[in-house]
Image: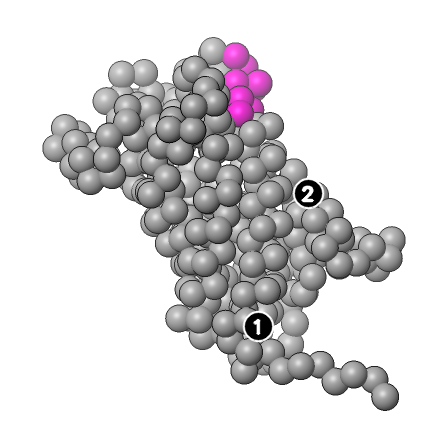
Amino acid sequence: MGDASSDLAKLSPLENIGIGVSAGTIEVCILQPMLYCKNATQQGLPFTLNPAVLYRGLTMSIMNMSILTGAQFPLTGAVSRAITGGESRGLSPKEQIGAGFVGGALSGFLCAPMELVMIQQQRNGGGLLSTGGRIVSDHGVMTLFRGLFTSCGREGLFTAGYLGAAPVIAEEIRERFGIEGKFGSFLGACCAGLVAATLSHPLDTVKTCLQGDVAQEKFRSMPDTVTTLYQEGGMARFFKGWSWRTGRMICAIWIMGQCKDRLAPLFYPHHFPPKKQPI
């Protein structure tokens, strides 16, 4: 697996958006049921295998992930170019992970309102526009940004995982154990996904509870939510839904990494000239 951040630095912002939107759409269509199960577990909602329920909010989820990755790829690419100062060089492991974190954190401003609408659809049903309109009408437009801080932190850690840590770990696995190709990339995604999911899951739990309770009947503010969750079950309460989210994150990191590796040369071959074969 190549250096994801360096590959993104080769592309223009518009080209990075194309790769990000495509990767995000593919990932969500495959993994939406895991997202529902994670959100339901965090909020104490009943478990279901009904596809009509599992795929509630799919349109907003696709919009969310497409716009999010469509922003994260160029943002991370821009941070990568800022780090190198325009020089044609690869990033160090620390630079790759740092570029991913900053690019992801900035995308949290886009993520918060879209995920809030999706979570409300999952809880209550309803269409995308009608749900958004109801939230604004009943609670005000700023309610759409509930959970903003936690969204930024979570997205920073997630993007540091799939655009930073995953290729770094895959390269380390290749050098230390000689494991290459798709299996090496998947092992890198597993390690990066496990770490990123564990570090960011408490933030995600707080965000999900805040966004699920737009009426503020139980969770009024971020500090209040943290206190309430801790009183309900100690630190373990912050890790409800961890297995669903970790599984999804591992799959998502691998899927989007594979999309980046395959779609970038396919869409924009002029940036990726064929390697010369040894004579």
Residue 85 visible somewhere in the drawing: no
- Could you say which quadrant of the image residue 75 lies in? bottom left
Three-letter code, disc 2: Cys
Q: Which residues are magenta?
A: 233-241
Residue furthest to the top in view is: 232
Question: Residue 229 vs residue 139: left or right?
Answer: right
Farthest residue, direction left: 137
**Which one is nearer the viewer's eye here, 203 or 114?**
114
Name the residue rendered at 51%, 32% in the picture. 34
Label 1: how many residues lie within 10 Å, few (<14), some (14-19) or many (20+)?
Answer: some
Q: Residue at x 53, y 22 (%)?
A: 240
* Amino acid, disc 1: Pro
Across and down, in percent, residue 27 comes to: 50, 47
Q: Position of residue 129 (x, y in %)?
A: 20, 40
Give the mark nearer the N terminus: 1 vs 2. 2
**On residue 190, which mark appears?**
2
Residue 172 on the magenta span: no
| Numbered tag placed on residue 209 in the rendering | none
| C-alpha span from label 1 to label 2 | 24 Å
Is label 1 or label 2 in front? 1
